[in-house]
Image (spheres, grey):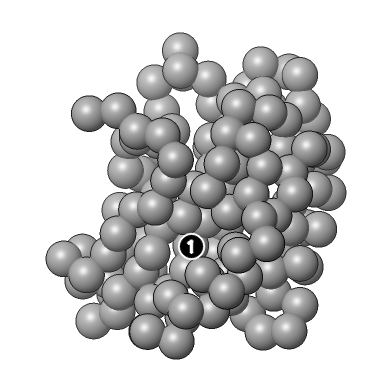
Amino acid sequence: MNKALFWDLQGTLGGNAVASIEMFEPYPFSKEALKLAKSNGFINIVITNQSRIGKGTLSFEAYEQKMNSIKNYFNAEEQLLEEFFCCPHTHDDHCECKKPKTGFIQLCIKKYNLNIKECFVIGDMGKN
């Protein structure tokens, strides 16, 4: 069985937690953190909430363009990030993929044969 780290994007790997993803800039230490995790056998997976898409203030195309540049940055020398998941929904949509719900994590448990006891979520905000 595999193990994974589920990373929040904004406010964790870079940028401002509540700003538009279009303003995202990685923190100087982010690549090293991802390399360290990978060298310790973790699969690095990003899960990001992007409710601006659901609200209509950010197009999915603009999101994809920025996400492609983020992927290229983190995976330029080696693949540090295995997968990227985006929840485009608003709170009112009551989806299962919007953090803190675990829809994407459940999907990854099956896809990557993860041992959930060896998986962790890393983020800058949280609610019980």
Residue 1 vertical position relative to residue 128 in the rendered view, above or below: below
Decide which of 11, 22 is in the foreground and name it.
11
Count of marks placed on residues: 1
If the image is split into quadrants, where does the N terminus sit? bottom left
- Residue furthest to the front in view is 28
Decide which of 47, 9 is in the foreground and name it.
9
Q: Image check: 112 left or right of 27? A: left
Task: Residue 82: tell me if it is visible.
Answer: no
Measured as percent of width and height from the top left, residue 85 is found at 54, 51
Question: What residue lies at 68% left-to-right and 62% top-to-bottom?
Answer: 28
**On the image, which quarter does residue 117 sit in?**
bottom left
Question: What residue lies at 79% left-to-right and 38% top-to-bottom?
Answer: 22
Measured as percent of width and height from the top left, residue 112 is found at 36, 73
Question: What residue lies at 76% left-to-right and 19% top-to-bottom?
Answer: 57
Measured as percent of width and height from the top left, residue 124 is found at 44, 40
**Tag 1 secondary structure:** strand
Residue 46 vertical position relative to residue 80 in the rendered view, above or below: above
Residue 89 vertical position relative to residue 103 in the rendered view, above or below: above
If the image is split into quadrants, where does the C terminus sit? top left
Measured as percent of width and height from the top left, residue 97 is found at 42, 38
- Residue furthest to the left in view is 117
**On the image, which quarter does residue 116 sit in?**
bottom left
Decide which of 22, 111 is in the foreground and name it.
22
Q: Name the residue under label 1.
A: 45
Q: Which amino acid does label 1 sit on?
A: Ile
Label 1 environment density (alpha carbons within 10 Å; few <14, some 14–19, many ≥20)? many
Decide which of 80, 33 is in the foreground and name it.
33
- Residue furthest to the top in view is 92
Residue 2 vertical position relative to residue 102 in the rendered view, above or below: below
Task: Residue 90: tell me if it is visible.
Answer: yes
